[in-house]
Image: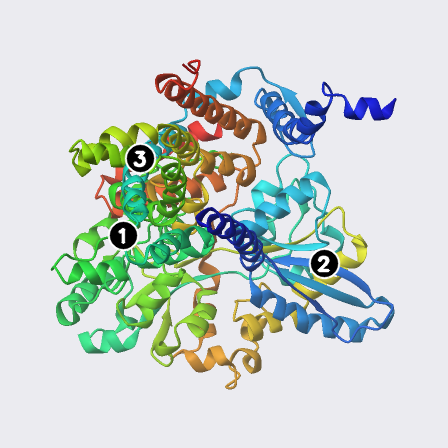
Amino acid sequence: MNRKWLVGLLVVSLALFAWGCGKSSSSSGAKSSVLEGGAGANATELEYWTFVELHGQHFQKMLEKWNAAHPDRQIKLKVTVMPYDDMHNKLSIAVQTGVGAPDIADIEVGKFPDFLKGTPQLEPLNDVVEPYKDTIVKSRLDLYSKDGNIYGAPTHVGAAVAFYNTEILKEAGVDYKSIVTWDDYKKAGQQVYEKTGKYMGTADTSALWQSSIMLAQQGKDFTDDAGNPVVNSPELIKGLSILKDLQKSNVIATIAGGQPDTEEAYGEFNQGNYASMMMPFWMMSRFINYMPDLSGKIAIAPIPVIEKGMPRSYGGGGTGTVVTKTAKDVQLAKEFVAYAKLSLDANIEIWNTLGFDPVNQDVWSMKDVTHNPDNKYVKYFINNPFDVLNEIKDEIRLIKSTPASPTINNVLGTVTLNEIFEDGKDVTQALNEAQKQIEEQLK
Amino acid sequence: MIGRFLYSQKVAPYVFVLPFVLVFLVFWIYPLASALEMSFQKTTLGQGAHWIGWDNYAKLAGDSVFRKAVANSVVYMALTLVILIPFPMLFAVWINNKSLWGREFFKSSLFFPALTSVVVAGTIFRLMFGEMQGSLINSFLGLFGIGPVKFLKEQATGFVALLSLATWRWTGVNILYFLAGLKNIPDEYYEAAAIDGASAFQRFTRITMPLLKPTTIYVITISVYGGLAMFVESMMLWNGNNSPKNIGLTIVGYLYRQGIEKNELGYAAAVGIVLLVITMAINLVQLTLTGMFRKED
């Protein structure tokens, strides 16, 4: 009797287990949908992979416009959304082996150098980018280029700005507009901590936004001109030492999740536990989607600098949309990508739908677009985001993306910043060790 | 002719083992051989490979992150052995007690975690061990005045989370193995021992443990392999393959990072071969010491 029971249990459990496996792989995996965009029966179906669901919404709008404007070359777009790591890993294997790759795909800037290794298995976009070249920020194209070929169409500039929670600042009697240097920030932060017991900002351990900001202010990068990593430069040591000092003075503190752009951190900010963050412009969409309680409380301002007069921003993050070598109709895919991401219409829609700072800076001064009172981003924030953008327009520096970048990101973002801000390790020592480790891994 | 061939007693055994042999050749020996080949090459997918001799292994020998991964895997494996052998054995003996009320219920509820997907379980454990004041474990600790602990950012506490997950998930499975073993021990032995005045503890150490030995050896062997090959638990607990200071990086995690994330398949193959060698070495030593290779008396 007992044995029968055991056999029965085993059979049931195996079946359940198999069901569980199948279930989990589909729920953690891809979500696909075909966008018609008003296309007729003769439309070509193209496949598009992305790791940001919102990007699909933007493509939907642009697809409708494309199909209306090109009745003889209509497109249906099959959009597949996958988690970040998963999508990049799958795409990498697919383009390298030439099997199973989509026609169009989004690649995040931190992963892009991996796709340019050896002979890139992506189509150069030079001819379709050409008509728009003069209207868009050149440095954003450089991010996705190799040997004079442009392989990715940029989405945004990603200008880093400061977001202040004015409710907390008011309680502490601090005016964010008077913060110009990190010294001002420190004084304001100490006041906030004394009066409210809350931290002014975050000490990021799992992302390099703050480190990049500090380097950009001093005109430096993680790599030298030849692309060799130099993470123990006096400039980075100085920058991180300033942050370390802020942490010691209770101005900034580490945050759950390790940086503002994580689920855990959204919760912390939403509850009003931190008064500010320094993040690229696209963080705005996270505020709207994940921190609804802060609506009407957040002000945008330029980031503090080490010394007055230093550049106050850099372009952070980014997504390059690529066309693979195995695309069904390479030319059609290329033209659609350029149309959907680089045309003036596309740039306006990128702001309207995604809340990004478009790479066509003419849009930045179109008052009817940027100050549209019905826009959800305009409604959410206290001041108009573009007023700040236009103020820092000429100060947005570039942090290069090189073949060494993925390794640099990995070592600093998993080991070094944790050692400095969680374990209290000496900044110089930690960065020297990081330099050694990066060199070792790149050998 | 064919009939004679099919009914031949000499051929039949081979026919019966053929499916296994085929599967073994295609899904084990072939990948193993090509991994061995790749570990001596620099391989970029789709762009060919060239021989570089022992370079991958030389690089591996000086790779501090790899050493960290090996240390993590070995410590994890050792700790799972310490937890997941004795406790399931005791639980099994307890559940096997016929006078226990509701044993079927305990049996199935202890086994139930094994049926959940690691992906779901890992995510829930990540939230439970979150560093915020309000996460489950921290609010519990808060009752005793212990401040919020950043579980997933420190080595020791990270392993507490990892081992809790492993214990929760695998205790039931090991209990089932031991229960099956216990069913093969005849009741007469216990009756005889009881008549001779043996205590419960003596019956456990003198009858149960020795007769469970084959089961124990089997459980140890698969636990050694399972511990060293652990990957998904760590990946789900830290929401990706990059834990702070690599505290949760395992050998397979490092293989994944090199092979899939960095597209260095040759180097990753070398990592895999080293893992195979370590696992084989530990298990061969263990099986020899426990006498599995000795001829039956």
Front-lying residue, B18 or A390: B18
What residue is pinned by disc 2? A47
Q: Nearer the viewer, mark 2 or mark 1?
A: 1
Q: Earlier in the sequence, mark 1 or mark 3?
A: 1
Chain letter for the residue marked with disc 2 in the picture:
A
Pointer 2 local density, CA inside 10 Å: few below 14, some 14–19, many at least 20 = many
Front-lying residue, A75 or B142: B142
Q: Nearer the viewer, mark 1 or mark 3?
A: 3
How far from the left and from the top, in percent, is residue A35?
Answer: 71, 70
> On the same chain: label 1 and label 3?
yes
Chain letter for the residue marked with disc 1 in the picture:
B
> On the same chain: label 2 and label 1?
no
Pointer 1 local density, CA inside 10 Å: few below 14, some 14–19, many at least 20 = few
How far from the left and from the top, in percent, is residue A109?
Answer: 54, 50
What residue is pinned by disc 1? B99
How far from the left and from the top, in percent, is residue A320?
Answer: 60, 54
Amino acid type assigned to the residue bearing label 1 in the image: Ser
* In this rendering, position of residue B14 left or right of residue A349: right
Q: What is the secondary structure assignment of the residue under circle 1?
A: loop
Q: Nearer the viewer, mark 2 or mark 3?
A: 3
Amino acid type assigned to the residue bearing label 3 in the image: Glu
Residue B294 seen: yes
* In this rendering, position of residue A26 left or right of residue A260: right
Residue at image position (19%, 38%) is: B200
> On the same chain: label 2 and label 3?
no
Residue B238 seen: no
Amino acid type assigned to the residue bearing label 2 in the image: Glu
Pointer 3 local density, CA inside 10 Å: few below 14, some 14–19, many at least 20 = few
What residue is pinned by disc 3? B188
In three-dimensional space, the C-alpha distance between marks 1 and 3, rounded to whole angstroms, equals: 17 Å
Chain letter for the residue marked with disc 3 in the picture:
B
